Image (cartoon, grey):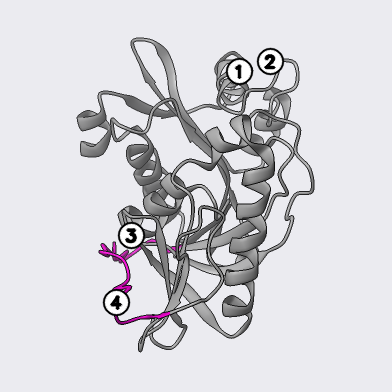
Amino acid sequence: MRAATRAGVRIRLAEDLPTLEPVSRFLAGVWQTPESQPPTASEVLRAFAHAGGAVHYASDGDGVAAASVLLFCSPTSLAVYSMIAAARTSDRGVGFALKQAQRAWALERGATSMVWTFDPLVSRNAHFNLAKLGASATEYTVDFYGQIDDGINGHDETDRLTAVWPLSDPHPVHLAGPDLESAELDPRPAPDGEPFSARDENGHWCRVPVDVVTMRRQDQPLAAKWRAAVRDALLPVFDAGFTATGFSRSGWYYLTRKEQS
């Protein structure tokens, strides 16, 4: 695969315990949990693979560089569900290569879309999912998982957006962000005192912090304020029938009505 070659990795399926165990340890490292308490244990990964799912992993000279788990949704949906995916670094294209491997595997088995969830506050994931891959976020769920005791989520509530990625013809969307001079700004400021919610003639915009994962470690109360502010801004927009169809490099979600997206 060209994406894997460009990223300097080899992507394979993990199916036996000797291969699945380092994948499980890798996921524990990414989520900053003890190896004895990984987000997905090796025996669970073994069951997923045995049930017909796909555990992909990318490797380089330093070992596992990325990993993911893919399962089928209900047969009538023709969709697959990406339970977990992570890369050691975000600057080499490894995550993109892994996603392309998932896509190829799913298309070969008749799937037409891929679904997963992600934290709306994590801007790098939002940009990857919506701008680079061309997925859309179709639903906002408050505290999806409840509290997760790891080094990424901290003590924050686990609000999630549901991403839907059309596999046969994805359309990456690159946006510059809203024109704050002409858009209708929400009078409520963000926790940093700047505008973060706006509306123009085509849809809604909402800004999130640059690096909420670091913020959670350094200032948990500030991260909680961002969670509440973004939830209050986005939840009613999704409930009104809008879909997040883009994300700008400056950190803004763009939401349009479903019939427009």
Residue 181: mark:
4
In the rendered view, tell whether residue 84 sits above or below residue 188: above
Q: Are marks 1 and 2 in contact (CB under 8 Å)?
A: yes
Disc nearer the start of the sequence (4/3): 4
The answer to whether residue 151 is above or below residue 68 is above
Question: Does 158 sit left or right of 238 as displayed?
Answer: right
Q: Quadrant of residue 25?
A: top right
Q: What's the residue type where badge 2 is placed?
A: Glu
Residue located at (38% from left, 10% from top): 62
User: From mark 1 to mark 4, how far is it between C-alphas?
Assistant: 49 Å
User: Helix, strand, or loop for circle 1?
Assistant: helix
Q: Which residue is mark 3?
A: 248
Which residue position is annotated with label 2?
35
Tell me which numbered mark, 3 or 1, is placed earlier along the sequence: 1
- The magenta-colored residue range is 165-184
Secondary element under disc 3, as helix, strand or loop, is: loop
Which residue is at the front of the view, 12 or 214?
Answer: 214
Say left or right for 68 vs 124. right
Q: Viewer-nearest of labels 2 and 4?
A: 4
The kind of residue on which mark 1 rests is: Arg
As helix, strand or loop, the secondary structure at mark 2 comes to: loop
